[in-house]
Image (spheres, grey):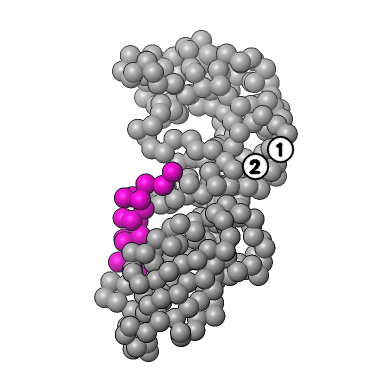
């Protein structure tokens, strides 16, 4: 699921940013070649995500072993010891911040996603992420959404056709934009269109859209549009959907709900590397 050629680039860039010329504090205090151990501890309840990435940071630095006590994607409770790390003391401290930053961010995304998914329990609507991700971290953030129980929308602009307001403005109409997409792209690709009104939904249907995004509508408006579409296209709700409102949108009968909040403004999960001792 994770492409480690991309993951390794992310980690190496992060390490270069944090230790461009080594760790001058640790190097002045810690004897070269000495060994230490430390515990990875949860400071709140949630879903743990990113353990393979955490371990990979130290694999790249070398001379360190990480033992996880909890499986990836598991529910954790404040105070849980997630795992233990031991090996080259200097390398542990050089990788600590990068490893924790990635683990905390990914666990925060997985935890929030899981909260959204729990709101959809018993319904057929599926939760999607968006492209509103941190530059260069998309593969990790979308992985975290999956671990949290969500589903991935496009990974990039190369993945699928999504005609939005700017495309429509350039083409002159939804009808023209869909016609252009059909004439210039392979027939195997589905065409999704962003709509904001009943008139635009009808135009998208008439033009043969495969997926209709109901953007910035209220739950009652979404319900009306789902009934109007009546299965003639896949439906997706998007725009200002929150944890408090997601179930009311799902009750409209929409097939998918996408939320940028899953990745663009998530709170980092509180995890610490503690009990660092020489061995």
Residue 160 location, quadrant: top left
Q: Which residue is the site of mark 1?
A: 121
The range drawn in magenta is: 1-18
Query: Which secondary structure class fits the magenta region best?
Result: helix
| Nearer to me, 172 or 158 | 158
| Nearer to me, 4 or 222 | 4
> What's the distance in space between the residues labelled 2 and 1, CA to CA?
7 Å
Name the residue rendered at 66%, 48% in the picture: 115
Q: How many other residues sit within 10 Å of disc 1, few (<14), some (14-19) or many (≥20)?
A: few
Above or below, 79 relative to 220: below
Instruction: Using the rendered image of the protein, determine whether residue 188 is visible from the camera's viewpoint.
Output: yes
Q: Which residue is the site of mark 2?
A: 117
Pointers 2 and 1 in contact (C-beta within 8 Å): yes
Name the residue rendered at 59%, 43% in the picture: 149
Element class at badge 2? helix
Residue 18 location, quadrant: bottom left
Residue 139 position within the rendered picture, expressed as x and y whole percent measured from the top left: 41, 47
Q: Please, which residue is most extreme toward the top here?
A: 206
Instruction: Using the rendered image of the protein, determine whether residue 17 is visible from the camera's viewpoint.
Output: no
Name the residue rendered at 44%, 21% in the picture: 191
């Amino acid at each position: 699921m994770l492409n480690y050629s991309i993951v390794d680039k992310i980690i190496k860039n992060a390490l270069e940013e944090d230790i461009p010329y080594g760790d001058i504090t640790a190097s002045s205090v810690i004897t070269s070649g000495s060994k230490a151990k430390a515990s990875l501890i949860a400071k709140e309840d949630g879903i743990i995500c990113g353990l393979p990435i955490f371990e990979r940071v130290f694999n790249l630095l070398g001379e360190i072993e990480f033992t996880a006590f909890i499986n990836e994607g598991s529910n954790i409770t404040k105070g849980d010891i997630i795992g233990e790390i031991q090996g080259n003391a200097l390398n542990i401290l050089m990788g600590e911040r990068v490893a924790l930053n990635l683990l905390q961010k990914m666990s925060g995304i997985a935890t929030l996603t899981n909260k959204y998914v729990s709101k959809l329990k018993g319904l057929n609507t599926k939760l999607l992420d968006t492209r509103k991700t941190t530059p260069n971290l998309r593969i990790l953030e979308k992985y975290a959404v999956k671990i949290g129980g969500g589903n991935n929308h496009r990974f990039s602009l190369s993945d699928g056709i999504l005609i939005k307001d700017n495309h429509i403005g350039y083409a002159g109409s939804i009808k023209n934009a869909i016609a252009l997409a059909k004439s210039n792209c392979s027939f195997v690709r589905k065409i999704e269109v962003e709509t904001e009104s009943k008139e635009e939904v009808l135009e998208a249907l008439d033009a043969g859209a495969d997926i209709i995004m109901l953007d910035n509508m209220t739950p009652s408006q979404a319900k009306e549009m789902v009934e109007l579409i009546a299965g003639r296209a896949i439906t997706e709700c998007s725009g200002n959907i929150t944890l408090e409102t997601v179930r009311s949108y799902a009750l409209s009968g929409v097939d998918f709900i996408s939320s940028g909040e899953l990745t663009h403004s998530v709170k980092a999960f509180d995890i610490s590397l503690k009990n660092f001792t020489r061995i």
